[in-house]
Image (cartoon, coloured by chain):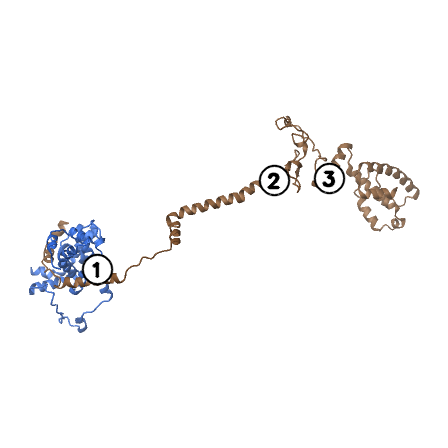
Amino acid sequence: MIHDDEKYRSLRDTLRSLPRVRAKSDFEARLLNRIKEAEKSTIHAPVKPVKEPVFKNWLANLFRPSLVPAMGLTAVLLITVAVYFGYFARMNDTQSVNEQTVASTNQGELIIYVKGDGEKNYSENYPKEYSAVSPSDNRSEHDAAPIETPSDYLSRPESPKAVEGYIKPDRVSEEQKIEMQRTLDKDEKGVDVKSEKKSDDVIMKKESRKTEPKKDMEKGDSPYNIRDEKKNENINTEDGIFDQKQENQQPEVNEKEEDKVEGKNKAEDSSRISRALKDSTKSKDTNKILDDKE
Amino acid sequence: MKPSKEGSEITKFSDEELIFSFQEGNLNAYNEIVARYKDRLTNFVYRYVGDYDECDDIVQDTFVKVYTSKHLYKEIAKFSTWIYTIAINLSKTKLAKQQKYKTFSISDVYDDENKDFDIADEGFTPDVDANSKFLSKHIQKALDSISENYRELVILRDVDDFSYEEIVEMTGLPMGTVKSRINRGREKLQELLKDIYKEE
């Protein structure tokens, strides 16, 4: 720094030796005038403080920049609480209802018990064999018998038991009723009711065909024959049921043989009908046919 | 604005004491400030701007600014630094306006280098001797020809004899920039004033 000043010493001396310029003699007077003008301009144009309304001031204080993050956080929290109580709480309720209404049997068959309009408690609709305490049991929950669980887990699971009496009839569909009835019949007699039903139908049809005029039989192209042919194809011939195919193959059998066969069949049919009447469900069709026969 | 009894005591005050006194409402303090700084500022501004009338306006504006903005002065810097900063800023503004509305010289119209129109100024008598008049004009021409940035700093350092620290405070530039600019300005001035040194 000093070295630079020394280097340019001659130049610095020359600049310092420059004659000093002085201000004008009337400098102060002109300055006074200028100051007065400046004061006048400030006096004539006074700055009026703009009064803001009180409500606006209050809003400005409330929504000042420093409070914006806090306000945002509060809004988010309020929305979260509203969504939780308005939506998720309802979802939890519906989940618990579904857990109550949907129950599975121990055989893996799914039975859905739907709550009725008049029902108050879901547990009313449960099959009572699954509950540890019977409805007639007046003891408290503490005195109730413990639930017995099978100790042998490798054992074959028990067959599903139909709970006819306890399920309300309006909760079970027609198909379920038929299925339940079949299982009951099978268990009691060990007979395939389904196949018997089919044979009964065939017998009934045969009876009905007998009543029809022979002319139709001879023609062989009546709508009844076509329908019977199709149906009898599926009938088991081992059970001694009337075989339409056989009939078609031996059209030359005389009437006597036919009568004999028919007589035997009649005897068998009558026995079967009586048994079927006992065992089978009371359908309207069979009743009609039986009435006709009688 | 004649000095009163109070004014005679005020002359002993430092610059900072004067401005604080003026901030409290003492007009004599302001008069004393004007008396102390009017010639100094005029010399500085004239060397920087190169035009006496412009210089007079700028100096008057500087004092008006001191009068109206007295409350802005804080005791963080010297008063001289503060008032020079105001003068420098006003000078720069004036120069910027001059460059925007650039005027042309009458001599340029006639295209005659030898023909020079000196407008008489009765109140301005900086040059007493003919020699000193010539020298002053020559140096002023050289100062006007260098860049404003260099000129400002060279005048502050070599004409008004401010320290580097004060110049840094006034201009707000880093110390290195101030030094380098002063040196470059000096180099250029030396080149322009070669003939003077030869004579010497």
Circle 1: is it few (<14), some (14-19), or many (20+) Cα within 10 Å? some
Expressed as whole percent of the image width and height from the top left, the position of residue B28 reads 15, 56
Residue B179 showing in the rendered view: no
In contact (CB < 8 Å): disc 1 and disc 2: no
Q: Chain of mark 1?
A: B
Which amino acid is tagged 2?
A: Asn
Residue denoted by label 3:
A177
Expressed as whole percent of the image width and height from the top left, the position of residue A233 reads 80, 44
Q: Colour of chain A?
A: brown
Expressed as whole percent of the image width and height from the top left, the position of residue B145 reads 17, 62
Expressed as whole percent of the image width and height from the top left, the position of residue B75 reads 20, 49
- Cα gap from disc 3 to disc 2, whole angstroms: 24 Å
Residue denoted by label 2:
A98
Circle 3: is it few (<14), some (14-19), or many (20+) Cα within 10 Å? few
Q: Residue at x 70, y 38 (%)?
A: A168
Which amino acid is tagged 3?
A: Lys
Examine the rendered structure and indicate whether residue A34 appears above or below residue B165. below
Q: Secondary structure at mark 1?
A: helix
- Cα gap from disc 1 to disc 2, whole angstroms: 86 Å
Which amino acid is tagged 1?
A: Leu
Q: Secondary structure at mark 2?
A: helix
Among the 4 quarters of the image, the one containing residue A28: bottom left
Is residue B26 or residue A62 the one in the foreground? Answer: B26
Examine the rendered structure and indicate whether residue A191 appears above or below residue A66. above
Task: Tell us which disc is closer to us: 3 or 2.
Answer: 2
Q: Chain of mark 2?
A: A
